Image (cartoon, coloured by chain):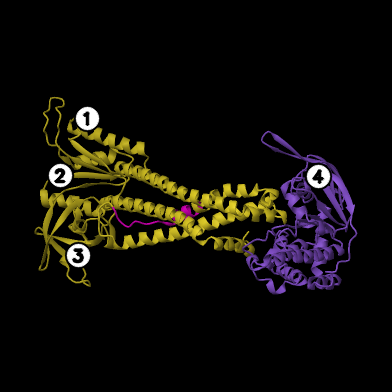
Chain colours: A purple, B yellow
Amino acid sequence: MIKIRNIHKSYTNGQNNLHVLKGIDLDIETGEMISIMGPSGSGKSTLLNIFGILDNYDEGDYFLDGKKIHNLNERKAALLRNRMLGFVFQSFNLVSFKNAMENVALPLYYQKIPRRKRNRIAMEYLEKLGLKDWAHHLPSELSGGQKQRVAIARALITQPKVILADEPTGALDSVTSQEMMDLLTQINKTGITMIIVTHELDIARRTQKTIRIIDGSIKEIVENEVRSTKYEDRTQVRSNVIASEAKQTKHELEIKSENQKYEKVA
Amino acid sequence: MFELDKWQEIYSTIQKNKLRTFLTGFAVAWGIFMLIILLGSGKGLENGVTDQFRGGANNGIWISSGMTSKEFKGLQAGRIIRFTNDDYNLLKESVRDHEYMSSRMFLGNTITSYKNEYGSFYLSPCHPDYGKIKEVEMIQGRFLNILDINEFRKVAVIGEKVKQDLFKGTDTVAMGEYININGVLFKVIGIFRDFGRDDNEQRRIYIPISTGQRVFSGQNVISQISMTTGDAAVEQVDQMVEQTRELLARKHTFDTKDERAVFIWNKSEDFRKFQGLFMGIRLFIWIVGIGTIIAGIVGVSNIMMISVKERTKEIGVRKALGATPFSIVSLILREAIVITGFAGYIGLVLGIGVLEIISRNLPEIEFFRSPEANFSIAVGATILLIVAGTLAGLFPARKAAKIKPIEALRDE
């Protein structure tokens, strides 16, 4: 799904030239769930930004789903992000004046899907994540875990191929963090590639592979023994997700066909 | 462009900062309000001055005789120049480009009676063209014609007020009745209304110049010659004035440079001067008005700048979720246009309302009457508002479009 070869990236700040990524090679297979760890300043966020087509790289090759991504104009990058990628952030980054449902529906707004339809789809996703009753609440009225679940629903709504999560549990307590990981694991099991940047070891351990980055280079890749978590049965969220897995709704097919159309154009 | 979604986006951001939006909008509303008031007042001034020009065609030339002030060809200064029918005929034949021409006698206020009613009215013997030159409106009957002149008919065209004064009551018939002017009976053949600003212009009686000369002076003397220039160009009119002066100078033997021998008032020249003046005033008002609006625009722009800064993170999220730069630019631009457009429209309506109130309650003042903002001003102001809104949003929108998602989303 993601293939990078010899990626270099440096930032120029005045006269200082900061070489952040020093030749990274990495292959992430479709459906993999990996974590990226490293001390701050190691370049892990930069790498995630490059994956997310939020930033350009100076040297090397980046193939996303077989397509080379390099120096795209902003419009093309925006379309690719919209169709291919889902983002989950540490600070949730919900739009404060939109309620949960509208936040979830926002990516579909940029696909020009009519309001009623996208709100209906957003409601389905909120229901899957157990947030149906909170659909009309503003982000300020939700707990951290709820906000992150709204953010995850928002990332999922376009049926992305890859979900990029930047410290998704950074602002959550440990119990909620584990719930979140359960959720992300379940989502991964539906076939969506999952890349999680984190600095918490027990979060990283719950992914299949951990990539350790230090000073802009990959130091080691650790294969984790994915434990069948004891939390799994506990969460309501999980069963909801499982229940919904079987139900490939009509709109998902529609979005998929739209994505295919788009891919042909691209 | 105008889907519900986009309106909701704007509505929700405005909701977030009600006071700020209100204050910004106020600046724009005030700018437009002032522009409308200024333009309306300018129009009022123009109306007032134009009103002073009423009562006679704007392209008229009025020639009156005076007294020589320079010696010429051995003749002394101080000679009184008298116009006669010969002068009228000379000008009529020689000044080819004129449209209408008439001579006139000044007989002053004359006692006139009908049955037991008496009044003193201004009696003015003239040619048929005078009605055209003075731009009177006939409300009954006709003005004088050439047969009246040729046959020395004792007929009179009377003003509306004359009719009211002599023929009491509204349903009385004046047409065909005989009125006694200074002891001579004249048949009423028409009643006119004059749009001149003076009531006295309605208290006039016009009779044929030929009859007037025969009955009241027994001579061929006339007091004034007037003509209109049709749609002649400015230079042509000047040439006509010059030609008139030369013809009269040769005939009466005075120096063409003697300004006091014959007075020629070229009304179109004065009118032109005023029109130039009002062009200047209008230009000035637009400059001042647009200046005021620019202050408003800068305010909107400033506020939008701050708003974009505050929303950096939100815009970054939108971009990460697939918002194209264009959609971000249009989001900000639309917001600016909606704020300026809406606020400006309120200013426009208020301004027109205030003008309307002033116009209704304004006492009669010379040189100022019925200030108004007409349709073209409203259209102009609307276009200005849209342009202003776009300008106000342009810089903030560009700033927003340049926001990089990574920087916006960086946790600080």
Residues under numbered marks 4 and 2 in contact, where contact means CB atoms less than 8 Å apart: no
Badges 3 and 1, same chain? yes
> Which residue in the protein does label 1 denote?
B257
Q: Residues within 10 Å of mark 1 (few under 14, many from 20)?
A: few
- Chain of the residue under label 3: B
Mark 3 sits on what residue?
A: B163
Q: CA distance from mark 3 to mark 4?
A: 110 Å
Chain bearing mark 2: B
Residue B325 left/right relative to A260: left
Marks 4, 2: nearer the viewer: 4
Of the numbered discs 2 and 3, the one sitting upstream in the chain is: 3
**Residue kind at label 1, given as amino acid type:** Lys
The residue nearer to you, when weighing A37 against A102, is: A37
The subunit carrying tag 4 is A
Q: Is residue B183 left or right of residue B33?
A: left
Task: Evaluate whether label 4 is on the same chain as label 2.
Answer: no
Q: Are marks 2 and 3 on the same chain?
A: yes
Task: Give amino acid for label 2.
Answer: Asn
- What is the CA distance from the residue labelled 4 to the residue labelled 2? 120 Å
Quadrant where the image shows the N terminus of chain B: bottom right
Instruction: Determine whether the residue tagged by mark 1 lies in a helix, strand or loop.
Output: loop
Q: The magenta stretch spans which residues?
A: B368-383
Which disc number belongs to residue A214? Answer: 4
Q: Tell me what residue is drawn at x 15 percent, y 29 percent.
A: B70
